[in-house]
Image (spheres, helix red, strand yellow):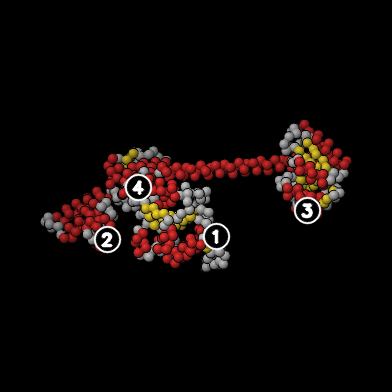
Amino acid sequence: MGTNAKESPAIGDGRRILIIDDERPILLTLEALLKRHGYAVETAGTAAAGLKLLETKTPSLILLDLQLPDADGLQMLEQIRREHVDMPVIILTAHDSLNNAIESIKRGAYHFISKPYAPEELISLVEKALEKESLLRETQVLREETEELREKTHELEKRLEIAETRHFPIFTSKAMQQIEELVSAMAPSDANVLITGESGVGKEVVANMIHQRSRRADKAMVKVNCAALPATMIEGELFGYVKGAFTGAMNDFPGMIAEANGATLFLDEISDMPADLQTRFLRVLQEREYRPLGSTKTLKADFRVIAATNRPIAQALGEGKLRSDLYYRINTFQIEVPPLRERKAAIPHLVAAFVKQFAQQLGKPEPAIAPEAFQKLLTYSWPGNVRELQNAIEYAVVLSRNDTIGVKELPAEVQLPTALQQTERAAVTAAAKRNGGVPTLDDVERSTILQALAQSHGNKKKAAQLLGIQRPTLYNKMKRYAIEL
């Protein structure tokens, strides 16, 4: 930026300068110089007069003399910086001292200039200081606007998550709609929740919905899968640890409880948490405080617990996998998510959603599903529930050709009933050829097992019930007859 007065912008915001100097000739000279370059100028001959002006008018920049009759210039600089953090201050002094220059910069001055000074040098310095001040002001405005936008975005994302959860196909059946109604009623509270159901039914989806509709939704839900971590690691993951607490603890780790402070802690497969750790965690829930491993400091804990397990509660309690005292503490509300085979009305909606999802991910048109393939999807028992269905549709979309999913594009287990029937017929035919049309007892038993597996759609538990035997017995017989699913 040049020093030509004609190039300077008109007086306005960002063009007001306060000069504080006890030498009147200097005040008048500086005032005239700055006004010629388009600045509005206020002057003060003492520190007191300068501070009084600052109470009523806020300049964009201050020119401050270090030697004032009623105050030390450096001390006044500190006072100005305390009350006007971002205001640039240029120090003026006849004492050409490097120490003074360094000290004034340390205390927050924008720059230091010695008397006498060239007018062009002073104007250039003033313009650079005001340019920086303008950029700082714009940055602050942008920062505030960004923060406001971030808050609005977060709120919109939160609403979108709730809307997506509400309309997600998992909630199309009557049973799941009843669960959603319960969630809407209890989510705003801090009540602990236990979610039960087979693997893959959507327990985590329900947990997410509870958190998203709670007063803690502004923070992310912290998830810990107790079955995925070795027993020796779960305690450190939950409670955290200090450096040196055990071999390998090279740094402090705050732990999941600390991360969940003010939010929700989701403990998936809680019945896989070691019994002694369940006792310690129960104490945290009761006292709302905990201590990291190796630490002597007790920390506060403010979090909501949502727990989940795929084990039937009676079984988990009976086998000692879940302590009864912990169960009663986390079971303020219990939500049982039914298996997919009991809510097959949701399958068409889920299939449509997953086909769309994976087609978009792969960048290909949404394939249609052939009627015979769709019938397979409806009649399969889905022992892996929604997760298995999702994987099956991804598999089918990847293999689909000519924009169609046929039976051959489905996973083998979904085609299982037909495949088993074909295997059964082949086994009986082979036996007839070997023995003149009379199958052996092994052939009959193998055929019977294949029939039971076909009727149960590959569900070994149900097949064993149909055969009137225990599952271990069925497994042994399948191994004996080389039956693989």
Residue located beneath label 3 in the image:
103
Which label lies toward us, 4 or 2? 4
Measure the C-alpha gap from mark 3 to mark 4: 73 Å
Which residue is more in the foreground, 125 or 19? 19
Q: Mark 1 or mark 2, which is nearer the start of the sequence?
A: 1
- Quadrant of the snapshot with the N terminus: top right
The residue under label 1 is which amino acid type?
Lys
Which label lies toward us, 2 or 1? 1
The residue under label 2 is which amino acid type?
Arg
- Residue sitting at 39 percent across and 52 percent down? 335
Which residue is more in the foreground, 398 or 289? 289
Measure the C-alpha gap from mark 2 to mark 1: 48 Å
Q: Tell me residue 187's x, y (percent).
A: 45, 49
* Residue 300 image label: 1
Which residue is more in the foreground, 406 or 47? 47
Q: Are marks 4 and 2 in contact (CB under 8 Å)?
A: no
Q: Are marks 3 and 4 in contact (CB under 8 Å)?
A: no
Measure the C-alpha gap from mark 4 to mark 1: 38 Å
- Residue sitting at 17 percent across and 54 percent down? 428
Q: Residues within 10 Å of mark 3 (few under 14, many from 20)?
A: few
* Residue 175 image label: 4
- Quadrant of the snapshot with the C terminus: bottom left
Q: Quadrant of residue 142?
A: top right
Q: Mark 1 or mark 4, which is nearer the start of the sequence?
A: 4
Q: Quadrant of residue 23?
A: top right
